[in-house]
Image (cartoon, grey):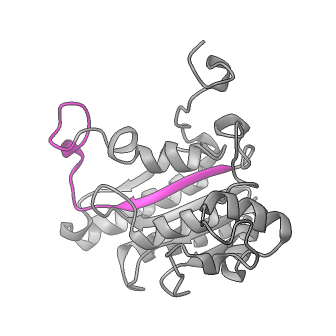
């Protein structure tokens, strides 16, 4: 199995970086191959612009998704986008490590998604969810946050986490392009716990990676339940 891991944290000594390293170490130790896109280390550009396209379908109006599709066909995407797309398409499993920022992913990771998950090979028209371009591949995330488990879920102060504040990522991004999305690994209260607790969390993450095949899969919309206009049957 080949895993491509997208890492979004600026500090090489962070707990998020330790999670990245644990995933790589554990996965390679059981015979998998792993590649890593370390977005801050790469100085990845997260900003969409016309410079992403070597050839314009419409030079007068920048309709980004349509230009993505056109430049994918023409093989004229910016090199940094093209190389990341190739890494994703070569993977059996797409993994992410990041800290939770303002109920979402860090800006650099959001920009990576917007530039790399392009219309054409990833999605388009009715090619979404089970019919998405990445159908047959899996994805998982390991992320940390400062909150405690009791702060999230029905009736809690923040509400549901995975199927609430992070639904845009797990369903609206990963599930939307056809990935089978595993329940994430969540490191709770990270900035405030003792080193021994962090060590235990990393050991739990290693076990999570060793048992990827047994991890629950998040429920996504079933296209069979909807008509050709995506209205309910």
Looking at the image, which is closer to me, 206 or 36? 36
Q: Position of residue 75 (x, y in %)?
A: 83, 72
Q: Which residue of the protein is positioned furthest toward the right in this rendering?
A: 74
- Give the position of the N terminus as an image quadrant: bottom right
Q: Nearer the viewer, residue 200 or 217?
A: 217
Residue 94 in which image quadrant: bottom right
For residue 171, side relative to residue 13 (left or right): right
Q: Is residue 142 left or right of residue 57?
A: left
Q: Is residue 161 above or below residue 71?
A: above
Q: Position of residue 80 (x, y in %)?
A: 67, 81
State which quadrant residue 83 falls in. bottom right
Q: Is residue 106 magenta?
A: no
Q: Could you tell me residue 107's position as x and y percent?
A: 40, 70
Magenta stretch: residue 139 in it? Answer: yes
At x 38% / y 48%, what residue is drawn?
A: 166
Residue in the image at 26% along x and 73% along y: 195
Q: Of 4 and 158, which appears nearest the observer?
A: 158
Residue located 70% across and 79% down the image: 78
Q: Residue furthest top?
A: 233
In the depicted structure, whether residue 122 falls above or below residue 107? above
Which quadrant would the C terminus be assigned to in this image?
top right
Residue bounds of the magenta highlight: 138-158
Q: Is residue 2 visible?
A: no
Q: Position of residue 106 (x, y in %)?
A: 39, 68
Number of marks present in the image shown: 0
Q: Is residue 110 above or below residue 212?
A: below
Q: What residue is drawn where x is 64% and y is 38%? A: 129
- Asked whether residue 40 is in view, the answer is yes
* Residue at the far left in the pictured view: 157
Q: Nearer the viewer, residue 22 or 71?
A: 71
């Amino acid at each position: 199995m080949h895993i491509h891991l997208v890492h979004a944290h600026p500090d090489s000594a962070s707990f998020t970086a330790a999670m990245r390293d644990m995933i790589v170490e554990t996965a390679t130790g059981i015979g998998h191959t792993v590649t890593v896109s370390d977005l801050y280390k790469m100085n990845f550009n997260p900003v969409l612009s016309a410079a992403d396209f070597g050839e314009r379908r419409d030079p007068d109006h920048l309709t980004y998704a349509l230009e993505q599709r056109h430049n994918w066909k023409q093989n004229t995407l910016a090199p940094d986008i093209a190389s990341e797309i190739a890494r994703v398409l070569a993977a059996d499993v797409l993994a992410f490590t990041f800290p939770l920022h303002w109920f979402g992913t860090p800006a650099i990771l959001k920009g990576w998604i917007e530039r790399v998950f392009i219309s054409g090979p990833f999605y388009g028209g009715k090619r979404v969810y089970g019919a998405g371009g990445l159908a047959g591949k899996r994805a998982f995330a390991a992320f940390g946050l400062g909150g405690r488990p009791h702060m999230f879920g029905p009736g809690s102060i923040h509400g549901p986490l995975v199927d609430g504040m992070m639904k845009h990522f797990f369903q609206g991004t990963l599930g939307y392009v056809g990935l089978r999305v595993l329940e994430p690994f969540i490191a709770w209260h990270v900035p405030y716990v003792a080193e021994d607790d962090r060590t235990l969390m990393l050991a739990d993450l290693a076990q999570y990676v060793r048992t990827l095949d047994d991890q629950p899969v998040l429920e996504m919309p079933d296209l069979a339940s909807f008509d050709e206009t995506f209205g309910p049957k």
